[in-house]
Amino acid sequence: MTAVRRLPIPVAALVQPPEIEGAACRHADPDLFFPTRREATDAGREQTEAQTAKSICRSCPARTACLVTSITMGEWEGIWGGHTPSERRALVRDGMAMRRDVSQLVHSLERGIRFPLRPNDFLAVIHELTLRRWSAEKLADALGVRVETVVQARVRARLAAAVLTAMEAPDRSERAAA
Ligand code: SF4
């Protein structure tokens, strides 16, 4: 099972100290991070292992670096940075959507004008106004959503922005989009 041995070794090679010192998977069973491709009857086990791997990633200080590394390296197997392959692809899509120019929307919101946001604009607007130091409460009030929704969107927007930044680095965009 060569592929199974790809974690955490690539992480150790690619993530810089001091993060790697505390990488939560250093002593974990690498099989947990590649739970797919067993027999169909193992679907339950596959899901359990994926959840176990995700729970290990949750406390890992290298989580964002690991996630971004997997995407920029074109690694579409296994659990990296607490994300499955499909979750990583969704983050790439979010990062692409965050390229949209939302300056007019942001300007209107800053002037107190309220309107429903299209889903494709949501993360970009949350990210931009967070950078402008809007609190979660203020954002929730302006966008007509719950504070918890804003908090979750902020985390997702931060990750998607990190992915986008890494993808736009020279020589990386082709591999990430492949
Ligand atoms: S985020 Fe998960 S897979 Fe990545 S280094 Fe940390 S524990 Fe390992």
Image: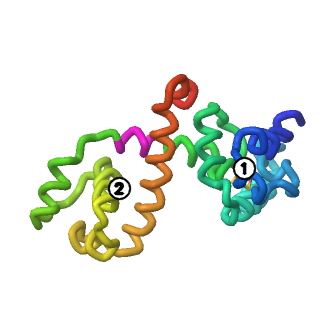
Residue sitting at x 49%, y 31%: 169
Query: Is 31 drawn above or below residue 126 in the view shown?
Result: above
**SS state under label 2:** helix
On screen, residue 17 versus residue 130, left or right, reads: right
Query: Is 178 drawn above or below residue 139 in the view shown?
Result: above
On screen, residue 173 versus residue 46, left or right, reads: left
**SS state under label 1:** loop
Q: Residue furthest front?
A: 18
Q: Main secondary structure of the magenta part?
A: helix
Query: Is 126 drawn above or below residue 112 in the view shown?
Result: above
From the image, which quarter does the C terminus lie in? top right
Instruction: Inspect this view and state whether residue 37 appears.
Output: no
Kindly identify which residue carries mark 1. Answer: 17
Mark 2 and mark 1: Cα distance apart in space: 28 Å
- Circle 2 Cα neighbour tier, 10 Å, few/some/many (<14 / 14–19 / ≥20): many
Residue sitting at x 77%, y 39%: 13
Amino acid residing under circle 1: Pro
Amino acid residing under circle 2: His
- Circle 1 Cα neighbour tier, 10 Å, few/some/many (<14 / 14–19 / ≥20): few
Q: Position of residue 65 (x, y in %)?
A: 62, 48
Residue 96 included in the magenta stretch of the image: yes
Determine whether the beta carbon of the residue marked 2 sits less than 8 angstroms from the nearest atom of ligand 1.
no
Mark 2 and mark 1 lie on one chain; the one further toward the N terminus is: 1
In the image shown, does 64 or 100 lie closer to the viewer? 64
Residue sitting at x 58%, y 43%: 68
Residue 71 included in the magenta stretch of the image: no
Q: Quadrant of residue 158?
A: bottom left
In the image shown, does 172 or 16 lie closer to the viewer? 16
Kindly identify which residue carries mark 2. Answer: 127
Q: What stretch of residues is rendered in magenta?
A: 93-98
Q: Quadrant of residue 14?
A: top right
Determine whether the beta carbon of the residue marked 1 sits less than 8 angstroms from the nearest atom of ligand 1.
no
